[in-house]
Amino acid sequence: MRVQMTRVCNNKERYYILFFYQTLFGFFCIERIYGASKNNKPTGKVREFFDEAEDAQNKYSSIMKAKISKGYLVV
């Protein structure tokens, strides 16, 4: 699952991409890529691995809620 969000803060457009997938070895991964829209390379990439799907889904939903409360809009 892939969700892309954007927001404008201080006349700068920011993006946040959130991935949720199962790896080849059976782990569940949440990958976050974020940065400024004007840059070619992302500012940061974060990967988190979970043994259980429920733990990963809880983390995914908490990240989504936090980003939406900061003003990000789903594209």
Image (cartoon, grey):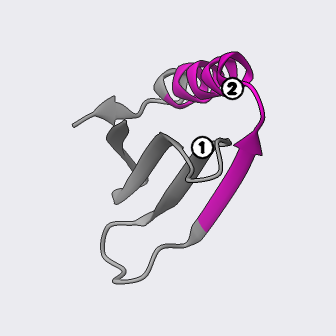
Residue that protrudes farthest toward the left in the picture = 75
Mark 1 falls on what kind of element?
Answer: strand
Which residue does the image show at 68% across and 16% down from the upper left?
54
Residue that protrudes farthest toward the right in the picture = 51
Q: What residue type is labelled 1?
A: Ile
Judging depth in this view, the residue of 45 and 8 nearest the camera is 45
> In the picture shown, does residue 11 fall above or below 6?
below
Judging depth in this view, the residue of 39 and 31 nearest the camera is 31
- The reply to whether callout 2 and callout 1 are in contact (CB within 8 Å) is yes
The main secondary structure of the magenta stretch is: helix
Residue 14 occupies quadrant: bottom left
Magenta-drawn stretch contains 50: yes
> In the picture shown, does residue 48 fall above or below 42?
above
Picture disc at residue 59: 2
In this rendering, position of residue 22 left or right of residue 49: left
Q: What residue type is labelled 2?
A: Lys
Mark with earlier residue (2, 1)? 1
In this rendering, position of residue 31 left or right of residue 10: right
Mark 1: few, some, or many residues within 10 Å (few <14, many ≥20)? many
Residue 21 position in % (x across, y down): 49, 41
Which residue does the image show at 53% across and 31% down from the upper left?
67
Disc 1 target residue: 30
Residue 58 occupies quadrant: top right
Which stretch appears magenta?
45-67
Mark 2: few, some, or many residues within 10 Å (few <14, many ≥20)? some
In this rendering, position of residue 37 left or right of residue 25: left
Residue 2 position in % (x across, y down): 35, 41
Residue 68 position in % (x across, y down): 47, 24
Which residue does the image show at 55% across and 19% down from the upper left?
65
Residue 12 occupies quadrant: bottom left
Which residue does the image show at 78% across and 34% down from the upper left?
51
